[in-house]
Amino acid sequence: MKYALFVIFFALLNGCQSTSRDLGIKGEAAFTASDPQYGYVAHKPVKLGGFLRGSKYEGSHIEYFQSLTGPNGEPVKVKRLGSCCPFDDQSMPFGGGMLDKYELSYPGQKKPVIIYVNLYQFEAPKAPQGFTLL
């Protein structure tokens, strides 16, 4: 009986060592927007919600930017450029809000891009074309 347990233990141990360590760094095409304007124009912002404390999606914008990669898994540098572009939404306490602009860049990219982000409303986010989400 001890011998059988010993053999099973080593078989399990060996099986764990053969587990793939690939973390899928290249992202998933399913998480990239099919619309080429998504995020790149003010009237089609990435809706991340989560800006307001205590909201259901609080902190989702941080997770989004941490999960965003270049097309081949490159780390993305994110720089907030400020607020812009007021929008109306009567469902919000003040009847609307402001979008934020972010500059995204990664190693090897020819020129940084600017995306528009809505931190008040939430829709399941995708990566703008040219980027992927892990």
Image: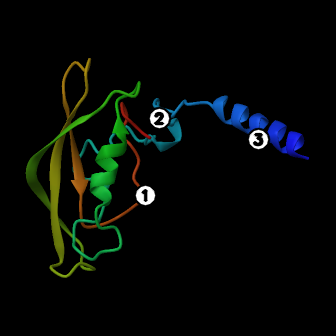
Q: Residue at x 47, y 29 (%)?
A: 26
Q: Which residue is mark 2?
A: 27
Q: Residue at x 26, y 17 (%)?
A: 108
Q: Which residue is mark 1?
A: 124
Instruction: Between residue 55 and residue 123, name the one nearer to us.
Output: 55
Q: CA distance from mark 2 to mark 3?
A: 35 Å
- Label 2 secondary element: loop
- Label 3 secondary element: helix
**Residue 132 appears in the picture as rendered:** yes
State the image coordinates of residue 8 (x, y, percent, origin top left): 82, 40
- For marks 1 and 3, the one nearer the N-term is 3
The type of residue carrying mark 1 is: Ala
Query: Which mark is nearer the camera, 1 or 2?
Result: 2
The type of residue carrying mark 3 is: Phe
The colour mode here is rainbow
Q: Residue at x 30, y 31 (%)?
A: 75
Q: Which residue is mark 3?
A: 9
CB of mark 1 within 8 Å of CB of mark 3? no
**Residue 38 appears in the picture as rendered:** no
Q: Circle 1: is it few (<14), some (14-19), or many (20+) Cα within 10 Å? A: few
Query: Which mark is nearer the camera, 2 or 3?
Result: 3
| Res 81 → quadrant | top left
State the image coordinates of residue 123 (x, y, percent, origin top left): 39, 61
Instruction: Between residue 14 and residue 59, name the one nearer to us.
Output: 14
